[in-house]
Amino acid sequence: MNGLHRPRQGRMIAGVCAGLGRRFGMSATTVRLLALLSCLLPGPQFVAYLVLWIMLPDEDRHAARSY
């Protein structure tokens, strides 16, 4: 499964950073740190996180669609 989804394991809040990390071959901690640092810059980071939280399917739903 190479698709972008929110995993069940390794979540902290919603699993968005863990999902992005798995998809792009990075650790979830690195993605979380980058997301935290990006909040220091002006822009819609919180809105982007909320949109990804809503739009990304859970791992269970993603697996069910793959069949």
Image (cartoon, helix red, strand yellow):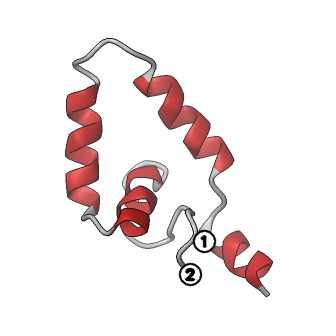
Q: Count the marks: how many? A: 2
Secondary structure at badge 2 equals: loop
Q: Mark 1 points at which residue?
A: 59
Residue type highlighted by circle 2: Met
Dot 2, crowdedness within 10 Å: few (<14), some or many (≥20)? few
Dot 1, crowdedness within 10 Å: few (<14), some or many (≥20)? some
Q: Which residue is drawn at 27% across and 64% down?
A: 26
Give the distance between the C-alpha atoms of the residues marked 2 and 1, in whole angstroms: 9 Å
Side of 34 where 11 appears, left or right: right
Q: Residue at x 27, y 47 (%)?
A: 32
Q: Which residue lies furthest to the top in this view?
A: 42
Residue 1: mark in rendering: 2
If you read the primary sequence from the N terminus, does the residue marked by circle 2 or circle 1 appear first? Answer: 2
Could you say which quadrant of the image residue 22 lies in? bottom left
Side of 45 where 38 appears, left or right: left
Q: Which residue is drawn at 35% across and 61% down?
A: 21
Side of 51 where 9 appears, left or right: left
Secondary structure at badge 1 equals: helix
Residue 35 placement (x, y as % from top left): 29, 38
Residue 9 placement (x, y as % from top left): 42, 73
Residue type highlighted by circle 1: Glu
Which image quarter is the N terminus in? bottom right
Front-most of 45 and 8?
Answer: 45
Decide: is 13 above or below 66. Answer: above
Mark 2 in CB contact with mark 1 (< 8 angstroms): yes
